[in-house]
Image (cartoon, helix red, strand yellow):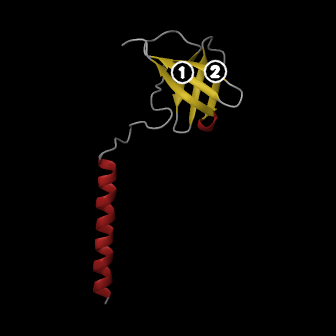
C-alpha cells in the first residue's frame, strides 16, 4: 500500500514539474505584458489627468513630450515632468489607457 502511494505521489510531482515547464516555455520571463507593456525607461510620454484617471500617450518617434518614463513596474509607473522638477508615481488602477500614436505608415 505504501509503495502505491509513493508511486502516485512521484507521478503527481513529475506531472506538475512537466506542466510547469511547459507553461513557462512559451513565455519569456522578462517579456512585459499588460497595460505598461509598450512603455520603456527614458521614453517621452504625454500625461493627461482626466479627473478620475490618467491617459498616457506616446508617439512612434522621439518627440519631446510633457513627461519621461523613469520606472516601469508591474503595477505602477513613475514619470518625470519635462522640467525635471517633479516625479509622479501612478498606480495601475489609476490609468484609463496607454495609447501609441503612429505618425509613420
Tell me the CA gap for discs 2 and 1. 8 Å
Residue at the bottom extreme of this rendering:
1
Q: Are marks 2 and 1 in contact (CB under 8 Å)?
A: yes
In-front residue for pair 57/88: 57
The residue under label 2 is: 48
Rendering quarter of residue 84? top right
**Residue at the image position 66 percent from the left and 15 percent from the top:** 85
User: Residue 61: horizontal and vertical position, in percent?
Assistant: 43, 12
In-front residue for pair 39/49: 49
Residue at the right extreme of this rendering:
51
Check the image and report above or below for 23 versus 82: below
User: Which quadrant is the C terminus positioned in?
Assistant: top left
Q: Which mark is residue 57?
A: 1
**Residue at the image position 53 percent from the left and 27 percent from the top:** 98
**Which mark sits nearer the N-terminus, 2 or 1?**
2
Q: SS at mark 2?
A: strand
User: Residue 59: horizontal and vertical position, in percent?
Assistant: 47, 16
Residue at the front extreme of this rendering:
105
Q: Is residue 84 left or right of residue 24?
A: right
User: Which quadrant is the N terminus positioned in?
Assistant: bottom left
Amino acid at each position: 500500500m505504501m509503495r502505491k502511494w509513493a508511486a502516485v505521489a512521484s507521478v503527481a510531482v513529475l506531472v506538475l514539474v512537466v506542466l510547469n515547464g511547459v507553461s513557462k516555455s512559451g513565455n519569456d520571463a522578462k517579456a512585459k505584458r499588460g497595460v505598461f507593456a509598450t512603455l520603456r525607461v527614458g521614453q517621452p510620454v504625454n500625461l493627461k489627468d482626466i479627473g478620475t484617471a490618467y491617459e498616457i500617450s506616446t508617439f512612434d518617434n522621439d518627440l519631446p513630450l510633457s513627461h519621461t518614463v523613469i520606472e516601469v513596474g508591474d503595477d505602477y509607473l513613475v514619470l518625470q515632468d519635462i522640467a525635471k522638477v517633479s516625479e509622479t508615481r501612478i498606480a495601475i488602477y489609476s490609468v484609463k489607457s496607454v495609447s501609441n500614436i503612429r505618425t509613420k505608415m
